[in-house]
Amino acid sequence: MSEIPAELRYRTSHEWVRVEDDVAVVGITDHAQDAMGDLVYVELPEVGQVLATGEEAGVVESVKAASDIYAPVSGEVVAINDALEDEPELVNQEAFGNGWLFKIKMADPGELKEMLTADQYQEQLDSE
Amino acid sequence: MGHRTPLYDEHVAAGGKMVDFGGWDMPIHYGSQIEEHHAVRQDAGMFDVSHMTVVDVSGTGARDYLRRLLANDVDSIETGRALYSGMLNEGGGVIDDLIVYKGDKDYRLVVNCATRDTDLEWMEQQAGGFAVDIRERPELAMIAVQGPRARAQLAALLDGERHDAVENLPAFAFADCGDWTIAGTGYTGEDGVEIILPGHHAVALWKQLADAGVRPAGLGARDTLRLEAGMNLYGNDMDGTVSPLEAAMGWTVKFNEGRDFIGRDALERQKEKGHHRLVGLVLEGKGVLRAHQKVITGDGEGAEFEGEITSGTFSPTLGKSIALARVPAGTKGQVQVEIRKKHLPAQVVRPPFVRNGKTVYKPL
C-alpha cells in the first residue's frame, strides 16, 4: 500500500499539491513513483513560467519510461527543486517530501476545490 | 493470467513486480532495477529465462536443414559450442534471433518467447525434404547466472561434472551434465553461465543461489544490461522488415561458397545497393534516449539523412543515456536526437558500451 497523506490534494494524473499560503508545492505521488520504478531524469518548468491548469509542466523519466507532469493549478512557477537534477532518485525516496518538483504561485486558489481529496484519490487507485 | 514459469512463486515471494511479457507473467524488477543492474555488473545476479522457447532439432538431416534455415553456419563451430544467428525470411528480414547449441548428434535452439508461434510454424514449414525432428521442450526451465562472481557462486553449490563445467567452460561453450545443459552464454556482457534444466529442478537451484547471495534480477535490468552490452532485442532493434546487415548482425551472416540459406539472395542485393546501419549513441547532456526518437545526421535534410533510435535507455553503469539507432551508412561524429521537439546532441559510437564492468565504446 502506498502512502496518501490526508492534508494534500491530488490530480487523477498522480500529481499532489501541498498548500503553503498562496503557493502550491507540486510533486508526484508515492503510487506514481512506485509504478515508474527508478527515476533517472526529471525535466522541470522554468522559474517565471506561467502555467495553465492541466498544461504540461515537465517530465519524469524512469529507466523504463517517460511520464508527463501536468500543472495541477494555474499560476507562475516561483521555484523548482534543483536537487533533482543530480538526484532524481529523491522522488523515489521521498515522493511527498524532498522529492517535490516545483512551486506555483496560485492565480486562483479556488481551483484547489476541483482537485481530489486523499479519499477520492484512494478510490481512484482502488478502481485502477 | 499469463503463462507462469516454475519460479513464479519465488518471484512473488521475493517482491517481484510481475508484468506481462510475451504472454508470460514475469518479474520486471524486485524493488530496484538499477540495484539489480549493478549487482550483475559488480557481483552476481540471476535471471529466470524459462519463458524462452527451447527447441531440439535432431535427425540425419539436421545439419543440412540448419545450414538452410540459419544465416550463420553451424559448420563454423565445433561440437560443444554455441552460435548466435538470425533466422531470416526470403526477403532477408529477421524472423527471430537465436542461439544454436551444437551437440554430438543433435542441435538445440533457444528462441524468443514472443515469436514462439511464428518460429515453430516457419521451422516446420521449412523442414520439408529434410530428415529432421523438431521438438519443443516446454518442460525445461532456464536460469542465467551472470556477473564477475557468478561462476564462483554457482560452482560452490555444485559438485562433479557440473561444478567443473561451471568453473571451466569457455564463453560460448556448453556441456551436457546429466539432465542439465550448462553453457557459457548470456545477455549481459558479463561472464557467467546459463543453465537449461528440468523445470522441477529450478526452484531448488534458485533458492540455493539466493541463499548464497546471488541477487534475483528482473527483465528491466536484463534490458539495460543487454543494451550496455550492445546486444540486440528482437522486436526493437530488428524484426521481419529489417535485415541482419541493417541490425549490426552482419558478422553472423556467413556467405560461404554455395550455401543457399534462406534470405541470401535478398542480402546480396542489399549489400550491393547499400543500406542503413545500426550504431550506438551516447547522449552528451541530460535526458533519456528512447526507441522511435528521430536522429538527424546533419549531412543534409530529408528522410535519407535521418535515422531512428531502436532501443534507448539510461545506462546505470555510465550514468548517462545510451541507445542503438539505425542511421544512414557513414554516419559518425555527432548527431542530433529529437526529444520532445528539442534537438539534443549525441555522440555516434561503436557498441558495446560496457563489457565486463568496463566502459569500452569507441567513437565513430
Image (cartoon, rainbow, N blue to C red):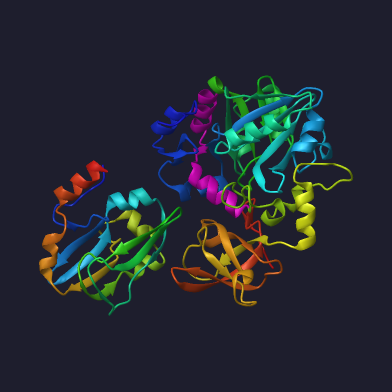
| Quadrant housing the N terminus of chain A | top left
Return the residue nearer the eye: A84 or B19: B19
Specify whether residue A20 is painted magenta: no
Question: In the image, is A12 to the left or to the right of B227?
Answer: left
x and y percentages locating residue A105 in the rendered image = 19, 74
Examine the image and state in which quarter residue A23 appears.
Answer: bottom left
Question: In the image, is B337 to the left or to the right of B331?
Answer: left
x and y percentages locating residue B116 in the rendered image = 58, 34
x and y percentages locating residue A67 in the rendered image = 37, 58
Q: Residue at x 68, y 56 (%)?
A: B246
x and y percentages locating residue B199 in the rendered image = 55, 23
Looking at the rendering, the stretch of residues picked out in magenta corresponds to B202-229
Specify whether residue B220 is painted magenta: yes
Examine the image and state in which quarter residue B119 appears.
Answer: top right
Q: Residue at x 70, y 66 (%)?
A: B329
Q: Residue at x 31, y 63 (%)?
A: A69
